[in-house]
Image: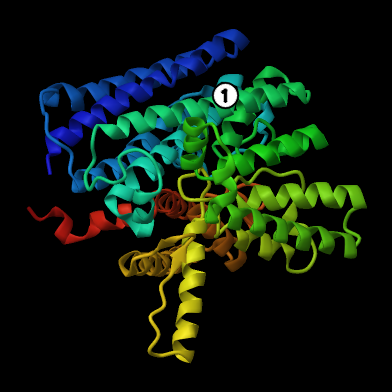
Amino acid sequence: MSLRMILRILGLLLMMFSLTMVPPILISLLFADGMWEAFAVAIGITVATGAVMYLPNRHARKELRTRDGFLIAALFWSVLGLFGALPLMLTGDTALAPTDAVFESFSGLTTTGATVITGIEFLPKAVLYYRQQLQWLGGMGIVVLAVAILPTLGVGGMALYRTEIPGPLKDSKLTPRITETAKALWYIYASLTLTCMLAYMAAGMDWFDALGHSFSTVAIGGFSTYDASIGHFDSALVEMICVFFLIVSAVSFSLHFLAWRQRSVTHYFQDPEARFLMLFLISLTVITVLSLWLTDTYSTELGLRHGLFEVVSVATTAGFAVADFSTWPGALPFLLFVAAFVGGCSGSTGGGMKVIRIILILKQGMREVMRLIHPNAVITVKIGKVSVPDGIAQAVWGFFSAYVMLFFLMLVGVMATGVDQVTAWSTVGSALNNLGPALGEASAHYGDLPELAKWILVMAMLLGRLEIFTVLVLFTPAFWRK
């Protein structure tokens, strides 16, 4: 492991990240909200820190190995999350306390969408834009991480995709071809964002709201420029546009890559993960809409609108809202919340455990049942036509075990700060799945939670976004041995 090489990369990343604070300055000058100075100061601090890391190590040149990849992936989000909080702490009357600023920054970059802010629409335009932009940048980072990097590190069973998705995934170490893959993914991501923005504008949003919501929609983030979220617009057309782009973004970007390269869409219908996601969303929508109708919660039209939107929004881990689903009757709030544990497809901007892992867990469960009936049978687990090696199956079970264990530990940690059980399990689940909305005392916002609880939730967001093992491996002595 080359620490000088890692410092060089981190310094370069920080200096590049400082450039993302230039657009908020332009927005501030355009709307004359007086916030440009805060972003200018943040740029100065970020560039100076990046330069201190980069300049002494600028000649460090080494081939990156797997161990370097783990450390860079974890430090990437950690460092950018901390420096991303700077502008939020420097914006005068609307400035956040350090803990709240870090929470908001990590929530944006990990596309969680949980917020500590109330009266969002009254924030300066530069701050509103910056929050949305954080999610957009985080969403692209996630796609590159999930499609191009994590499979090469063998994280949590995602090595299955080495044989199926484009780029450097057949290699056992990080290679320059990741750059080519990342570039293609950027084109796709930016094209989806632009298309989403134009669709929102056609549906009646002004350019600023359309830009901000296209950022958080394609990133499956959930931040909005209004407290009422998408519900502020009270438009069925806006909601359906949002639903469409959430589903598109919840599908693996490797499929979008193939569609772009092969000029074909047939593989969307052939992909087992995409098919499972659609079946899951349709089934959950039917259950939700029927429940809302049978309990006379809404009229026929509103029941269909709100039911469909909230199912897609929560199940894909976006967290946009047109209604407060925590007040819905019966088991619906719990059912929707648990759906977020499934999340989006691997290689998408969605959170959760990922559809591919859920499929593998279900198939392995069925295999164990069949082994009880036929003890001597050799039964393979297949995803489509691909046989899954036992090593990947074990990695998925390992991931699931770690997921449950960490959920339990952080749940106890948040409850130890004085938070009630419903609020604690829903906020931890929401943070770990990068969902955003929660139940109990945090159903409106997270601002009233104790500071320690917020730091635990920041760690949960990071663990959830980096597929857990990427962070956990750093805490093992073996990782640091030469």
Residue visible at 24% across and 58% down in the picture: 475
> Label 1, on which residue?
129
x, y (%) of residue 3? 14, 39
x, y (%) of residue 160? 37, 56
Residue visible at 23% across and 36% down in the picture: 175
- Vertical placement of 306 versus 331: above or below? above
- Vertical placement of 6 versus 292: above or below? above
x, y (%) of residue 42? 39, 22
Q: Looking at this view, name the residue that lies furthest to the left.
A: 482
| Camera sees residue 471 | yes
Quadrant occupied by the N terminus? top left
Q: How crowded is mark 1: few (under 14 residues within 10 Å), some or many (20 or more)?
A: many
- Amino acid under disc 1: Tyr
Residue visible at 56% across and 14% down in the picture: 27
Residue visible at 64% across and 30% down in the picture: 213
| Camera sees residue 419 | no
- Vertical placement of 301 versus 207: above or below? below
- Vertical placement of 64 versus 344: above or below? above
Helix, strand or loop at mark 1: helix
Judge by depth and name the residue closer to the eye, 136 or 85.
Answer: 136
x, y (%) of residue 401? 40, 70
